[in-house]
Image (cartoon, helix red, strand yellow):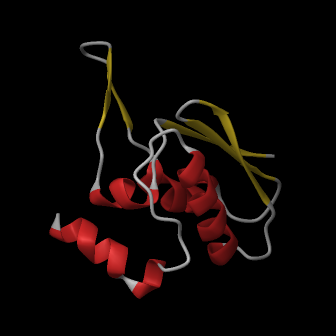
Amino acid sequence: MEAIASLRSDPAWASLIQSDTGDGTIAAKNIRALLKTSFPETKFSVRKLHYGTLKVTWEAGPTRDAVCAVTSRFASGTYDAHTDCHGSCLTPWMRVFGHADHIFLSRG
């Protein structure tokens, strides 16, 4: 709980919305804000496809890996191929700034 309290009070993240919802809505808003700050020259589209799934698209600019570095902290879904089971792993970041099960990236 100390990590959560620290994130909530950290001025570096003051511009982000704080919520623990897992439907992707808050995560999408926060991803938009972080992408705009990280890549101000690039226009991104962050859309909620359905419950817990987001799609991030952009035409030019940063690489997929660079965008993934920003968005991956919001992805809570896990998949174990050995047991063919889906799971979820929530970090303190996700509990404060929202999360989505899956985040798909597409650079046009």
Q: Residue at x 59, y 47 (%)?
A: 25
- Position above or below: 18 against 85: below
Question: Would residue 71 be found to the left or right of residue 63 on screen?
Answer: left
Residue at coordinates 66% horizontally, 61% vertically from top-left?
Answer: 32
Q: For the N terminus, which image quadrant?
A: bottom left
- Location of residue 108 in the rendering, given as x and y in whole percent from the top left corner: 81, 46
Q: Is residue 73 above or below residue 17?
A: above
Residue at the top extreme of this rendering: 84
Point 22% across, 69% down: residue: 3
* Location of residue 67 (image quadrant): bottom right
The answer to whether residue 103 is left or right of residue 85 is right
Residue 70 point in image, percent of width and height: 52, 62
Figure quadrant of residue 10 = bottom left
Q: Position of residue 8 (x, y in %)?
A: 35, 73
**Residue nearer the viewer, 63 or 100:** 100
Residue at x 26%, y 66% (from the top left corner): 4
